[in-house]
Image: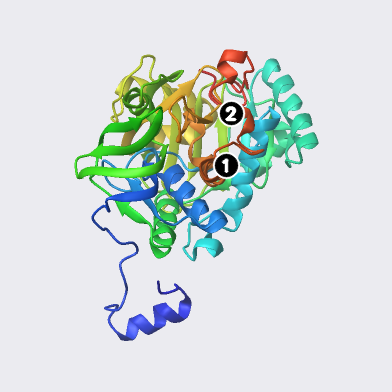
Amino acid sequence: MKRYSAFAIAREAFRHHAGWERAWRSPEPKSEYDVIIVGAGGHGLATAYYLGKNFGITNVAVIEKGWLGGGNTGRNTTIIRSNYLQDPSAAIYEKARSLYETMSQDLNYNVMFSPRGVMMLAQTQAEIRGYQRTAHANNLQGVTTEFITPERVKELCPIIELGGPRYPVLGALWQPRGGTARHDAVAWGYARACSDMGMDIIQQCEVTGIDQSRGKVTGVQTTKGAIKTKKLAIIVAGNSGDLAKMGGFRLPVESISLQALVSEPIKPCMDVVIMANTVHGYMSQSDKGEMVIGGGTDGYNNFTQRGSYHHLEETVRALIETFPMVSRLKMLRHWGGIIDITGDRSPIISKTPLGNCFINCGWGTGGFKAIPGSGWAMAELVAGGEPRELASAFGLERYQEGRFIDESVAAGVAH
């Protein structure tokens, strides 16, 4: 793999850019692999990358029924933060945030990480108490956050309206080292690195069945034929329940569409990320000038990847109270992503009842920000067969034991 650099760009300019290689190979599947990962989104590709980088396991296939990064990785609002309340959550999200800081250098691919800061508005007295509690917890966890005054909020984001008609801004939980990254670039960077290690990324290859013998996985049936494997990792977000059913077990998750939209491009006016839980919306400005706006989930289980106008109207109406300028913008496009939500709003990184089969799902609204930490923890689980520190609290058994990791509020969207 040729390294990307300023010198490479200059060299290829004299060659009319005819010497660039494909970023990753698109091979036909082999008959057998040491590990098969189902799902070529950010979490699946990160798992493959850290299997190779940290454990030297490179006989790996990443199988995707559509195109690489075409699921939730390409359908989110790119927010990165780690200001969660519970210790296990803060640990894995902070690991992810720290890996994002050096990801461009590690992958030799610019993921456009922007540590612009993330602000979670407190617009009720209950939220003030909740965010102050989270700030104290983060301080003990080694995560840098603070609760700031309305005046500081206005200083950081001049376009905000502090005295909204229903919910005035009373303060905010501020994480200065949070931010955003380019979602497609994260997937492409991991894919390029995995391909360079000799891993196979197989697109347009849907899994139709899971083969097993004596309680252990032996392979998968796909639209490109049967493939044998020693270990199987299922990392398919909203379709996790379907794959689990093929493996003969059930998951405590529900799939719902989460919607977002972007406005027409405008001049720079907002250099932070703001989340408003009470009015249920969040917003940042992309490098192209678009206002990236997200809201809540549909009120019913579904697998659609389209937006619905009533939900978008609800989200924008709420944001207009806090950002009056939004009322003058035109919507450029909107979409939906299929998320899988657990009862305690925390993920599952776990062994399954099927031997040598592992599951990573249930990230809900927090999937993108967790990609590198999730991949790191999942790689440890797949390589060793048992979860290590990062993943140990997120096993399936916690639902039998009543050992929940309640992040219904710190997740930022309390549904």
Q: Name the spot of residue 38 as percent of width and height, x first.
A: 36, 40
Q: Name the spot of residue 211 as percent of width and height, x first.
A: 30, 33
Q: Compared to 118, does 215 lie above or below?
A: above
- The residue at 72%/35% (across/down) is 151
Dot 2 falls on a residue whose secondary structure is: helix
- The residue at 43%/44% (across/down) is 44
Please give the label number shown on residue 185. Answer: none
Q: Name the spot of residue 414 as percent of width and height, x first.
A: 54, 19
- The answer to whether marks 1 and 2 mark residues whose Cβ atoms lie closer than 8 Å is yes
Q: Determine the residue located farthest toward the front in the rendered image.
A: 214
317 or 250, which lies in front?
Answer: 250
Q: Which residue is mark 1?
A: 377
Q: Compared to 85, does 180 lie above or below?
A: below
User: Which residue type does callout 1 highlight?
Assistant: Ala
Residue 229 located left or right of residue 141: left
324 or 219, which lies in front?
Answer: 219
Q: Which residue is mark 2?
A: 394
Q: Local crowd at mark 1 within 10 Å, few (<14), some, or many (≥20)?
A: many
Q: Name the spot of residue 173 as percent of width and height, x first.
A: 68, 33
Q: CA distance from mark 1 to mark 2?
A: 10 Å
